[in-house]
Amino acid sequence: MSLSQPSASSPLIATDGAAGSVARHGLPAAAAGVGAGLIVVLLMWAGSLGFRTFDAALIGYAVGTIFAAAAIVYRYTLWIMRPPTWRYFKAGWVNFFSWRNFRHYTLLIPVAWWRDIFAQTFIRKRSTRRWVMHLCLFWGVVLSCCITFPLTFGWFRFTFVPPNDYQLWFFGLPLLRFAVEGLLGFTIYHGLDWTAALLIVGLVLAFGRRIQDAGLLTLQRFTFDLMPLVLLFAIAVTGLALTASSTLWQGRFYWFISLTHEVVVVAWLLALPFAKFFHIIERPASIGVTLYQTVNQESSADGESCKRCGRELPSRQFIDDLRGTLTDLGQHYDLGDGQGWLQEYCPTCKRVLRGQAYYQLMGKRFL
Amino acid sequence: MAIKTMFVDPSRCIGCRACEAACRECDTHKGESMIMVDFVDRRHSVATQPTLCMHCEDPVAPCAQVCPVLAIMITPEGVVQQAEPSRCIACRNCVYACPFGVPKIDLEARLMKKCNLCYDRTVQGLKPWCAQACPTGAIWYGDYEEFINQRRGHPVRRTVFGDQEVRTRVFHVLPEPADRLDVSALLRQARQDLSREEVREEAWVLD
């Protein structure tokens, strides 16, 4: 199945106000992408002390990361320039930098980060199995990135300290000294093996769900949903195989496995902005939205209510912003005669209003 | 090949809620109904109206257009899907932007759900659950020509809210030839009628 998003690239949306998004924002987005790539190069240069501690064997990963960073920032810039996203983006940061909000909602943002990003408790509401699956995938990916990127960029390096210690350096600064043969050392050398194991647990649960769930079997798309998971699985398996090759197979197949590992890692990184894993970049938006909604709801003196039934609506600011977004998109749902905009009614009343109109048309005669 | 879609005729709805029960069987939103049956004038009438996603074509899916995280996607057939679970941040933009009051939100689970025209069934040539279960044909699935040959009524797919016209993939069935369902004009008429006298429902039986 193929799906299209109503984004600037979709022909389905050729008539709406966001249609020219790529045309309008393409150049600034491309410039931001190039800028991001250059910043990564600069950070690599600084972190590796002018490329002196840079590991040339990792050049493929480094180049892949530079291109991936550029592509992610390009996609991210186009994304936040869309009318609804830009409105939340702006309002979220304005709320964040408000001293008043900081005093009132000091704990709100850390709690939101915990709930939405680190512990992802909202996924537990969807299903406990999905929650466990997602935690394994999330922490597997995040910890792997935390280990891989600094190593690739030359930010981490190890030096031998006689008689039997290793010194870990970060950005040229001494970070940690540990025994070569100790438990801590063993844990550090195999850091990517632990994260690969975590990923495999999550991926087995994810594939199990995708094979068994009748709804998902119809709705999932190979390139969007499955390919990133397949690539992640290939990364985890080839990563473990590298350890197996060096510790169990006397280095056999090492060259082939390391090349395959590099290819799948770079493919996954380059696919990141265009498939399911772009949600890693998007998801922190929920923190801004939580702040926006809490601040606006609690700052409205009387709250905002449905024009027909009086049921509480999110907030006046929310309704006004939504109307603004719809206007930006060339849509105006003003009912006229002082009845207000359709967006000032709760969903039930919108349905009932249409029902009443139909009822009127029928001469109030139903079956 | 003719495009199959839904035809909604609220005048035939008897409020049995078989559609809601059947909708809960859908594999893509298990146990939860995405179709809503509402009383249209509870004080004076037992008249009810079923609402399912109208799958807006022009403007294309306002719910998807206002989604800040691009979570709502559209199939090449024009079926507007429910939010992609990995992206939805439960901002509620779609819920309040939808002119038909369709999307449901689960704030705890950070997820919007809506009718996706039983995509798992319709891609196999089966009817959506609600159309399968509706005993009176208030919700009917087929193509336009089939409808014209088999059914009474005049299907329209343009709904007007004030200055905004919305063309949908799903049809409303009107009692007389018309090119659109003008909600604002009809509500104005209803308000004028009410100001003149209390209008009672007349008993009416389809022949």
Image (cartoon, helix red, strand yellow):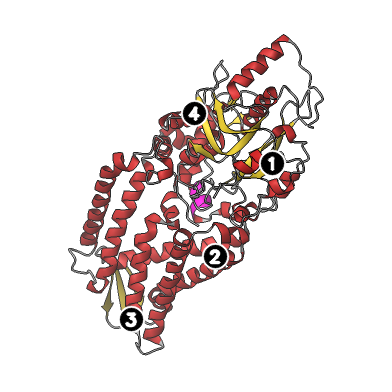
Extreme top residue here?
B196
Residue A296, given in percent of the width and then of the height, sits at: 51, 31
Q: Which residue is mark 4?
A: A317
Q: Is residue B104 visible?
A: no
The spot of residue B110 in percent (x, y) is 56, 47
A112 in magenta: yes
Q: Mark 3 belongs to which amino acid?
A: Phe
Is A16 placed above or below A362 here?
below
- Give the amino acid type for the residue marked by disc 1 in the picture: Gln
Secondary structure of the residue carrying numbered label 4: helix
Determine the secondary structure under disc 2: helix
Q: Residue furthest front?
A: B149
Mark 1 highlights which residue?
B150
* Chain letter of the residue carrying label 3: A
Q: Quadrant of residue A230?
A: bottom left
* Circle 2: residue type: Ala
- Label 4 and label 1: CA atoms lie apart by 49 Å
